[in-house]
Image (cartoon, grey):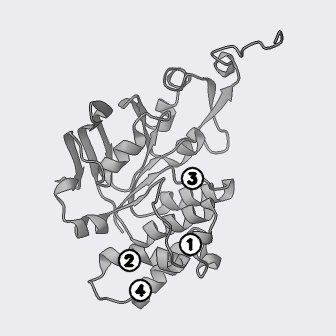
Amino acid sequence: MSGTELAVESVTLTAGAHHLVRDVSLTARLGEVVGLVGPNGSGKSSLLRAVYRVLRPSAGHVRVDGTDAWSLPVRRLARTVAAVVQEPGADFDLTVRDVVAMGRTPHKRLLDGDSAEDAALVAWALGSVDAAAMADRPFDRLSGGERQRVLIARALAQQPSLLVLDEPTNHLDIRHQLAVLGILRRLPATVLVALHDLNLAAYYCDRLHVLCEGTVTASGPPAEVLTEELLAEVYGVTAEVAVNPRTGAPQVSFLPGEHDRPAVALPDHSGS
């Protein structure tokens, strides 16, 4: 694997008359881990779909190493870009090892079998996400967190130079969240990842792009982006941001307050 330069240039995505994202531009440089953060419905997943070529922009371009991603042959794109999505689709009637081995498909010709190199890469990917012991288990019998780890392993086995992940830590316990994000930091690849946990994003990402209502509100290193003012504006919450004395990364603490109160009072049935 080697890093790939990603450039999203003035991309607009629509669904009928509704804009999912509007005029969004961002970059992920060679070898960077770049985070997308923002509230639910801000356009993070939609933007990622445009990058891994599921949702075509109605305006703008997604460029991979300077080439429009939508002009690349499917096989070349699959050798370059791997995606881990929130909704992987139907269950696989396969073992865990077989699912991870699917990541090697872009590197094979039609009738090629698995090589020793393929087997070694599959074993490495399974070990990387602490799933080696599950290799012979049916994929469709796994828990949500176990499936997530296997799908991440499949993407690792693909050996992409650009890895796109949509909430990869969903369903994972704390230990596996840290392990997976640690892997992403060490990969010789460019990573674009959507995350909800701002403290994980602050520690593991080189730069953040904050989306709100389909547009980029702020971009830059986590220490510059994650301010109390931005959190109040974008998320509508009260928070304190400090520097973690052990890691040196920004640490966000959310404070209970007026935003926690229900907007509408519950009906009074005491007289009924």
Tell me: 179 left or right of 117.
right
| Residue that numbered label 3 is attached to | 169
Q: Position of residue 20 (x, y in %)?
A: 34, 35
Mark 2 neighbour class, 10 Å CA radius: few under 14, some 14 to 19, many 20 or more? many
**Disc 3 and disc 2 in contact, CB within 8 angstroms:** no
Residue 34 as seen in the image, left or right of residue 142: left
Q: Mark 1 against mark 2, which lies toward the viewer? A: 1
Say which residue appears at 55% left-offset and 61% top-offset: 148
- The residue closer to the viewer here, 226 or 197, is 197
Q: Name, please, the residue furthest toward the top.
A: 271
Look at 50% across and 33% down and name the residue there: 39
| Mark 1, other Cα within 10 Å: few <14 / some 14–19 / many ≥20 | many
Number of other residues with Cα within 10 Å of mark 3, as a class: few under 14, some 14 to 19, many 20 or more = many
Q: Find the distance from the CA under tag 1 to the CA under tag 2.
A: 17 Å
- Location of residue 196 with respect to 152 vertically, above or below: above
Hey, which quadrant is residue 43 in on the image? Answer: top left
Query: Label for residue 139?
Result: 1
Q: Residue 117's mark?
A: 4
